[in-house]
Image (tube, helix red, strand yellow):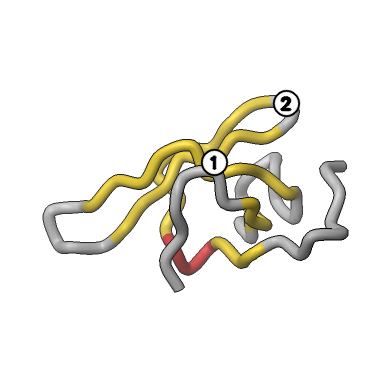
Amino acid sequence: MSFEEDDRVILHDEHSEHDGEVGTVTQKMETMFGDANYIVSFEEGQEQGVPEDNLEPAEEDDEDD
């Protein structure tokens, strides 16, 4: 699934301090291999270079933790 700017997503990355948190896609970048990487902003920071496989769409009732 592809995400666009302002989409609300849940990050799944056990190495991130934002693992399991709901954030907002602020930028979508394409790698030279055609894969999408994202910058996701959270209440307390952001993650850069997040691959699409580490994101899932957030439900309307999911809250920021």
Name the element at disc 1: strand
- Residue 22 x/y as whole percent: 73, 49
- Residue 56 x/y as whole percent: 61, 66
**Vertical side of 1 occupied by 6: above or below:** above
Which of 12 and 24 lies nearest the eye of the viewer?
24
Q: Which residue is drawn at 42% across and 58% down?
A: 51
- Residue 54 x/y as whole percent: 53, 62
Q: Which residue is drawn at 41% across and 39% down?
A: 27
Which residue is disc 2 drawn over?
44
Examine the image and state in which quarter residue 10 appears: bottom right
Name the element at disc 2: loop
The C terminus, quarter of image: top right
**Vertical side of 36 occupied by 1: above or below:** below
Q: In whole angstroms, how far apart are the C-alphas of marks 1 and 2?
A: 11 Å
Which residue is disc 1 drawn over?
40
Q: Which residue is drawn at 46% across and 59% down?
A: 3
Which of 22 and 15 lies nearest the eye of the viewer?
22
Amino acid at pointer 1: Val
